[in-house]
Amino acid sequence: MKVLFGYQDVLDMITDGITPLGKEATTAQEAKFKEDKKKDYKALFLIHSCVDSDNFEKVGDCDSAKTAWGILEKAYAGADKAKVVRLQTHKRQFELLQMEDKETINDYVTHVTRLGNQMKLCGEVVSEQNFVSKVLCSLTPTFDNIVVAIEESKDLKTMTKDELQSSLEAHEQRMDERGNDKAKAEVALQARFNEKNKKSKGKWPSRGKKNFQNFDGKESQNSRKGEGSSKGEGQDNYKPFDKSTKNAEKSAITHSEKSAMVTVRDGAQWRNEWYLDSGCSTYMTGRKDWFVKINQATRSRVKFTDDTTLAADGVDDVLIMRRDGGHSLIKDVMYIPGIKCNILSIGQLLERNYMIWMENKVLRVLDQNGVLILKAPMAANRTFKIELEIMEHRCLATAVWSGFKPNLSHLRVFGSVAFQHITGQLRKKLDDKSEMMLLVGYHPTGGYKLFDVSSKKIVISRDVIVDEENQNFQPAEGALQQPFRTETGESSRRPTRRRGLP
């Protein structure tokens, strides 16, 4: 506004106003007063033309331009006390302002300039050196090298804001060009790999797939369709094309009514690496051979941000080996053929009452009792991944030969505690209905071979309950020092008859 008043030569009417005319004014004074009054009306007209309807209600009744300008100045700048309060707020915002990762140099410099102008309206003096120092100390870490170069090569006391902005924008443009070239190279490499994979898909359409069977004895889907080794088990035959890739790409996917963020890395799915992702809603992997048995009744479609979709062909458990030699199950893992990484959902871990603890660039997963389950250090690309040893599932010889999976539910663990039933004819009213023994093997007649610790005999019986979880049976001292006696029938209390050859 002051620029407009200066251009129209009425700025003195805003600052000084009109000098009142005395009673004994001369003709020259009257002519000057008449000219000043004309200029005052001109300034008042400019104010009425520039303000909106709300502010016009405040200055509509003013008879001079200086009065109207004073009202507007108090409305925007406030009184002296209000200026002090606003100045403190602007100073705090100016000191805490930091450049964001997605913000450009032009946008950030404009933001700093806007805050500086607001501080000037409140009476604060903000020099060029203050602007330069603020911009240099609040940039993102990607500009650290150019900041050091500017501080060493130029004099910050004489450097202007425009010079600093031009230097930073030139460096920003160079980084953007290099980033675009790198992205184009990665896309070209990916396209070359996909073209090579398509060419090798139909070269040997049925090699090694004709008589292949899955763990459940059924013929595989690829062998029925006559496809080559491009998906599923066949992908184990080629080597990942890029092992030096360290930047993980992220894609948003949807599964039924859920949404998940997937960290994608070429070749990661063929190793035992699992990414712990806070944006993913469920466990997922692309390795079919890791599953115990896939439940294909649960099917859905997965959509990525580039509008590509993949089919989720089932959900089941993955068996892993612990460091102490034991086994554990990762339950409800989604099988998605073609996905390029293995994901452990942090949300699903929290849903199952696990605790997540992130400190000193390490992510720890604890159970309800505070026992450490997983420990994943942060990688160079700011992702958390852990390598788990997967238990391999192989077909038994019986399944390959006969075409069906054998039933092993009737087998028991040797050395377990077994309880042999005592029939009613051999016990009294208050006697126990069973006798505790040790399972030592099987008899050709189909019964269990048990060892009676009290009588030191081998007993053959079918009416037995085996407690496989209880294998810490401790007999009395000296009970096993005597040699085993001859085998008996259903009970050691039943009398035996000596048999001889004819």
Image (cartoon, grey):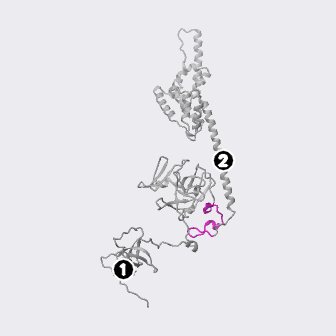
| Left or right, residue 158 beside residue 458 | right
Can you give x and y, in whole percent of width and height, for residue 231 in the image?
A: 62, 61
| Foreground label between 1 and 2 | 1
Whether residue 442 is situated above or below residue 105 in the rendered picture: below
Can you give x and y, in whole percent of width and height, for residue 497 in the image?
A: 38, 86
The 10 Å Cα crowd at callout 1, few under 14, some 14 to 19, many 20 or more, is: some
Magenta span includes 314: no
* Span highlighted in magenta in the image: 211-237
Can you give x and y, in whole percent of width and height, for residue 444 in the image?
A: 46, 80
| Left or right, residue 224 beside residue 406 | right
Query: What is the quadrant of the C terminus in the image?
Result: bottom left
Query: What is the quadrant of the N terminus in the image?
Result: top right
Camera-side residue: 295 or 429? 429
User: Which residue is tagged 1?
Assistant: 492
Residue 125 visible in the displayed image = yes
Camera-side residue: 453 or 286? 453
User: Which residue is tagged 2?
Assistant: 184
| Left or right, residue 202 beside residue 10 | right
Can you give x and y, in whole percent of width and height, for residue 253 in the image?
A: 57, 53
Q: Residue at x 67, y 58 (%)?
A: 197
Q: Earlier in the sequence, mark 1 or mark 2?
A: 2
Residue type (three-letter) at the residue carrying disc 1: Ser
Whether residue 439 is situated above or below residue 274 in the rendered picture: below
Residue 40 visible in the displayed image = no
Toward which corner of the image does residue 106 lie, by quadrant?
A: top right
Disc 2 element: helix
Q: Residue at x 56, y 41 (%)?
A: 101
